[in-house]
Image: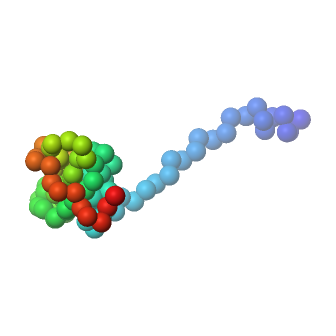
């Protein structure tokens, strides 16, 4: 009887997991975010001032098989690409595929 009542009673709603957003600290992390967004190969990354707070990363991305690449601005706080601008395709890195 109690088993049947336990099966019929709705379960309490599960709490969503809480994630602590850590700023993007390394150029490698910023490059990975830009590569994921554009589908290209990140060539270089440098820190830039952004938002007046923690800043961001400027990442140049090589696009294989295209004549133009991307310059992406990655926000350190939100882990997102805020802006993408087309640039002449930078040279591909030698140590990658």
Q: Is residue 83 visible?
A: no
Q: Is residue 15 above or below residue 91?
A: above
- Identified at 50% across, 52% down, the residue is 17
The x, y position of residue 12, in whole percent, is: 63, 41
Q: Which quadrant is home to the C terminus?
A: bottom left
What is the basis of the colouring in this image?
rainbow
Name the residue located 46 percent from the left edge and 54 percent from the top edge: 18
Name the foreground residue: 47 vs 62.
62
Name the residue at 31% across, 61% down.
96
Asked whether 14 or 26 is in front, the reply is 26
Q: Position of residue 19 (x, y in %)?
A: 43, 56
Q: Position of residue 48 (x, y in %)?
A: 12, 62
Locate residue 47 relative to residue 2 in the image: left or right.
left
Specify the quadrant that holds the N terminus: top right
Seen from the viewer's position, the closer of residues 94 and 53 is: 94
Quadrant in which residue 67 is drawn: top left
Using residue 46 as the reference point, say whether residue 9 is left or right of it.
right
Q: Residue furthest right?
A: 1
Q: Position of residue 21 (x, y in %)?
A: 35, 58
How many marks overall?
Answer: 0
Please identify the residue farthest to the top as the structure is shown.
8
Q: Residue at x 59, y 41 (%)?
A: 13
Q: Specify whether residue 35 is in view.
A: yes
Closest to the observer, 21 or 11 = 21
């Amino acid at each position: 009887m109690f088993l049947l009542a336990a099966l019929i009673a709705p379960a309490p709603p599960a709490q969503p997991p809480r994630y602590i957003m850590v700023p993007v600290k390394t150029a490698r992390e910023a490059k990975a975010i830009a590569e994921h967004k554009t589908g290209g190969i990140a060539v270089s990354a440098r820190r830039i001032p952004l938002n007046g707070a923690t800043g961001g990363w400027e990442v140049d991305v090589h696009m294989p098989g295209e004549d133009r690449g991307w310059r992406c601005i990655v926000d350190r706080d939100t882990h997102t690409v805020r802006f993408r601008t087309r640039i002449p395709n930078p040279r591909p890195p030698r140590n990658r595929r």
